[in-house]
Image (cartoon, rainbow, N blue to C red):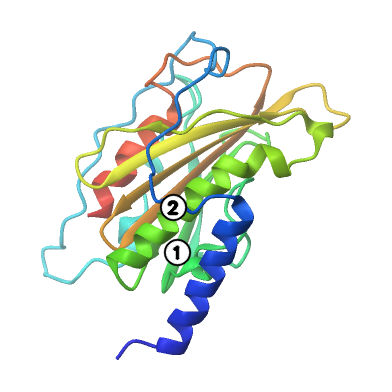
Amino acid sequence: MPDLPRLAAVAALVTGLLVASGCTDTDDSPGTPQSGDSPATGTSAPAPSSPTSATPSPSGTPLTLVDRLLPTAEVPGLNASWTWQDGETGPAGTEPFGFCAKADLASIGATEVVERSYFPPDDSDDSAAQQVAEFPDVRTARTAWTVLKAWHDRCAKSASAEIALKNRPLVDVPVTAGSGRWYLLSWQPPGEETGRFEALGMVLDGTRIAVLRIDNSGQDYNYPAGQEPMVGMTTAAANRLD
């Protein structure tokens, strides 16, 4: 039997988050990119190795959420020579995932959330990570999907003017099942000479949502449209989510 008090509390919290974000519309279509919002084109990131769809193990044991996290080898690098290193895997904490997030996924209805991090091949502070969340039903997952969009839409308005945050529009990512999308943030940390970029991808498939993040420093973000590392990471994540 569903935990009705818990579901009611989650519904109230989600409603509050949507109202605070100024978004109660369930339309999750991406915004139209405006002139100057797209990153400059240039050298593309290497394509990730062909991802393998998540299928039951030979023994027939059902897949866990951890099984649906991307192996390190399937995470696209920042350039042709970039290879991510194994990070840490386990239950997700309670910290919001991504610059724009206002709460963790459990707070907007997820019953289980796991996380995996990926370390850079050098001594930089660049990083990547993924969370996969299970929701009690399709309706709750779709509501959480709307909350993720609302966080994006209101992100720049809630950020400090000091960092000059630039929030690009959501862009659809073609996936074989469910829905995929991503966006790019950039800002200038006070006192630092180089800027910061955060690419945030997300996939919805049934009762599951995957959220993905790549953070890196740099002067620019030079990838042809559709060949950004996060596009490849989102596509690979979708193949493991169903």
* Residue type for callout 2: Thr
Q: Position of residue 25 (x, y in %)?
A: 44, 50
Lateral position of residue 157 relative to residue 72, left or right: right
Q: Which residue is mark 1?
A: 114
- Mark 2–mark 1 Cα distance, whole angstroms, equals 20 Å
Position of residue 150 relative to residue 186, above or below, is below
In front: mark 2 or mark 1?
2
Looking at the image, which residue is at 48% across and 59% down?
Answer: 115
Element class at badge 1: strand
Q: Position of residue 179 (x, y in %)?
A: 30, 44
Looking at the image, which residue is at 60% across and 52% down?
Answer: 21
Position of residue 194 relative to residue 134, above or below, is above
Residue 189 visible somewhere in the drawing: no
Looking at the image, which residue is at 33% across and 33% down?
Answer: 173
Q: Position of residue 128 (x, y in %)?
A: 53, 42
For the residues bearing labels 2 and 1, Cβ distance under 8 angstroms: no
User: Mark 2: few, some, or many residues within 10 Å (few <14, many ≥20)?
Assistant: some
Element class at badge 2: helix
* Residue type for callout 1: Val
Kindly indicate the quadrant of the structure image that contains residue 139.
bottom left
Position of residue 53 relative to residue 132, above or below, is above
Q: How many marks?
A: 2
Residue 88 visible somewhere in the drawing: yes
Q: Nearer the viewer, residue 210 or 28?
A: 28
On residue 103, which mark appears?
none
Q: Position of residue 61 (x, y in %)?
A: 17, 72
Q: Which residue is mark 2?
A: 146
Q: Farthest residue toward the bottom?
A: 1
